[in-house]
Image (cartoon, helix red, strand yellow):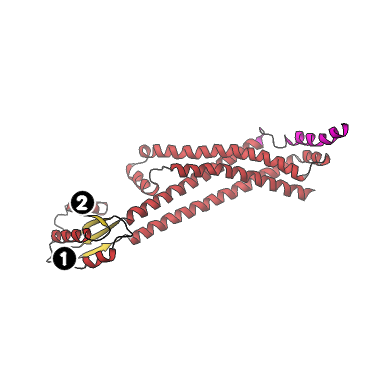
């Protein structure tokens, strides 16, 4: 019985000794929680921005892909209104086209206002006219047939917006890749911060580690104690940062319309939609929390094992 008590006492003593190695309410612990919260917040905001841009890019591609434009230039000897009616009729007869509509002269002039300004009298100038063609199913639309049919209309040309669509996809892809690169840098910075915090804690508690070794605690046991403590710190900081990121997007979504000027708000709406993350974006930010916590625990364990191996 006495032997059993003696055999159990080292483990019990070890646990009681290792509990305060990284005190939960120590300055180092609070600082690390705050650091992880900040890093999680930045990761969540970056990931949320990537999700918003990706969703907007998909919406852009879908909207642009379902519309083509017929442009009819003024030609000498040609009646513009007659050419417009012919183009509309040819478009409506094309398989895969759901509707076609010619823009009025007032609508065409309004399209020029961003470049020419408002208040100009363009009635004396012959300007190109547009026919907007909506596609029911872009995959089934016979665009080559429409192009051949439009060859009979003088001054008519078809714009499928393919170049603009490619530019939009390239821009969105660049933003997404940049966001993922920033997210990677944040993760690397978090790992380095955890490494420095762990090594500092080990150095400041070297005497306790030596006592644990003296009573028979293994390197694996000590590393496990650090891993559990840092896992708790990572979860607390991650939850705070994750909630902060979600609240940030909620506040931006509600406050963008009232704070940002109408013109800037319209441009931001084109790029990011309505700042609505959706359920997939919220799940993505929530998934950052356990990832950061696990990363904190694993990094601390590996750092402790390496520190103990170098100093043993």
**Residue at coordinates 47% horizontally, 39% vertically from top-left?**
248
* Residue 89 seen anywhere in this rendered image of the structure: yes
The Cα atoms of the two marked residues, 2 and 1, are separated by 20 Å
User: Within 10 angstroms of label 1, few (less than 14), some, or many (20 or more) residues?
Assistant: few
Is the magenta region chiefly helix, strand or loop? helix
Which label is found at residue 107? 2
Q: Nearer the viewer, residue 101 or 159?
A: 101
Which label is found at residue 307? none
* Residue 127 seen anywhere in this rendered image of the structure: no
Q: Is residue 41 left or right of residue 88?
A: right
Does residue 21 show up magenta in the picture? yes
Choose the circle earlier in sequence order: 2 or 1: 1
Q: Nearer the viewer, residue 102 or 44?
A: 102
The x, y position of residue 232, in whole percent, is: 63, 37
Relative to 300, is 10 above or below?
Answer: above
**Residue at coordinates 71% horizontally, 42% vertically from top-left?**
224
Snapshot quadrant of residue 115: bottom left
Element under disc 2: helix
**Residue at coordinates 41% horizontally, 58% vertically from top-left?**
170
Relative to 95, is 259 above or below?
Answer: above
The x, y position of residue 214, in whole percent, is: 83, 40
The x, y position of residue 73, in whole percent, is: 20, 63
**Residue at coordinates 55% horizontally, 36% vertically from top-left?**
240
User: Within 10 angstroms of label 2, few (less than 14), some, or many (20 or more) residues?
Assistant: few
**Which quadrant is home to the N terminus?**
top right
**Residue found at the very far right of the displayed protein:** 2
Q: Is residue 283 left or right of residue 84?
A: right
The range drawn in magenta is: 1-27
| Residue behind mark 1 | 75
The x, y position of residue 234, in whole percent, is: 61, 40
Element under disc 1: loop
- The total number of labels drawn is 2
């Amino acid at each position: 019985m006495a032997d059993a008590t003696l055999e159990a006492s080292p483990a019990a003593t070890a646990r009681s000794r290792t509990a305060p190695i990284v005190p939960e309410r120590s300055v180092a612990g609070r600082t690390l929680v705050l650091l992880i919260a900040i890093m999680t917040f930045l990761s969540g905001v970056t990931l949320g921005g990537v999700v918003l841009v990706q969703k907007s890019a998909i919406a852009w591609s879908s909207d642009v892909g379902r519309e083509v434009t017929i442009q009819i230039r003024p030609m000498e000897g040609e009646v513009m209104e007659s050419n417009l009616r012919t183009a509309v009729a040819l478009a409506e007869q094309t398989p895969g086209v759901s509707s076609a509509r010619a823009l009025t002269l007032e609508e065409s002039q309004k399209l020029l206002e961003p470049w020419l300004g408002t208040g100009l009298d363009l009635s004396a100038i012959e300007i190109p006219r547009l026919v907007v063609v909506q596609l029911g199913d872009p995959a089934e639309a016979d665009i080559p047939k429409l192009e051949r049919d439009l060859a009979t209309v003088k001054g008519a040309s078809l714009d499928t917006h393919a170049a603009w669509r490619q530019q939009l996809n390239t821009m969105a892809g660049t933003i997404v890749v940049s966001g993922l690169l920033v997210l990677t840098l944040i993760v690397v910075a978090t790992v380095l911060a955890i490494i420095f915090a762990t090594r500092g804690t080990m150095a400041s508690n070297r005497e306790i580690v030596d006592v644990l070794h003296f009573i028979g605690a293994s390197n694996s046991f000590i590393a496990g104690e650090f891993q559990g403590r840092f896992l708790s710190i990572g979860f607390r900081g991650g939850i705070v940062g994750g909630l902060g990121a979600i609240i940030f997007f909620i506040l931006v979504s509600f406050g963008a319309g009232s704070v940002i000027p109408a013109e800037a708000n319209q441009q931001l709406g084109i790029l990011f939609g309505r700042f609505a993350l959706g359920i997939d974006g919220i799940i993505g930010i929530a998934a950052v929390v356990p990832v950061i916590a696990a990363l904190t625990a694993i990094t601390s364990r590996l750092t402790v094992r390496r520190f103990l191996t170098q100093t043993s």
